[in-house]
Image (cartoon, rainbow, N blue to C red):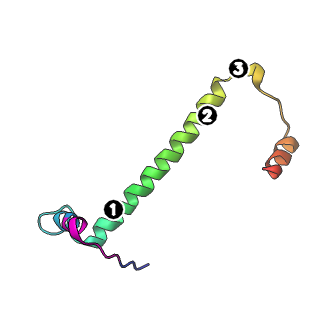
């Protein structure tokens, strides 16, 4: 995939400061790829944290609140969702 992005002003200056001989990246493409990877990792971490919180809530519930289900009931419930 090829992307063309036009930036100017302060954003352009910021990118320029992070690319090249004095920056952390050799070129703008490398910088953009790293930003995308970091954003992807951030989203995955947020999703994991939500799942982890849901599991903590589920396992913290008293056992008396659990409802036993067989496989057919679970499949039927998931079809309705």
On screen, 41 above or below 64?
below
* 2 horizontally vs 16: left or right: right
Assign the N terminus to one quadrant of the image.
bottom left
| Magenta-colored span | 5-13
Q: Which residue is mark 3?
A: 62
**Label number found at residue 54:** none
Q: Of helix, strand and loop, which one carries label 3?
A: loop
On screen, 58 above or below 74?
above
Sort mark 3 into few (<14), some (14-19) or many (20+) by Cα contacts within 10 Å: few
Q: Which residue is mark 2?
A: 55
Q: Is residue 45 magenta?
A: no
Upstream in sequence: badge 3 or badge 2:
2
Quadrant of the rendered structure where residue 37 is?
bottom left
Upstream in sequence: badge 1 or badge 2:
1
The residue at the point 43 percent across, 50 percent down is 42
Contact? badges 3 and 1 (CB < 8 Å) = no
Quadrant of the rendered structure where residue 10 is?
bottom left
Quadrant of the rendered structure where residue 68 is?
top right
Where is residue 63? Give x, y as percent.
Answer: 73, 21
Label 1, label 2: how far apart the Cα atoms are: 31 Å
On screen, 68 above or below 20?
above
Sort mark 2 into few (<14), some (14-19) or many (20+) by Cα contacts within 10 Å: few
The residue at the point 47 percent across, 52 percent down is 43
Q: Which residue is mark 1?
A: 34
Q: Is residue 9 magenta?
A: yes
* 70 horizontally vs 16: left or right: right
Q: Of helix, strand and loop, which one carries label 1?
A: helix
Nearer to us in this view, 7 or 23: 7
Q: How many marks?
A: 3
* 25 horizontally vs 70: left or right: left
């Amino acid at each position: 995939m090829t992307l063309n992005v036009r930036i100017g002003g302060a954003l352009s200056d910021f990118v320029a400061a992070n690319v090249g001989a004095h920056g952390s990246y050799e070129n703008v493409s490398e910088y953009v790829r790293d930003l995308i990877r970091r954003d992807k990792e951030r989203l995955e971490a947020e999703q994991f944290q939500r799942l982890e919180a849901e599991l903590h809530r589920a396992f913290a519930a008293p056992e008396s609140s659990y409802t036993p289900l067989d496989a057919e009931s679970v499949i039927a419930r998931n079809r309705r969702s």
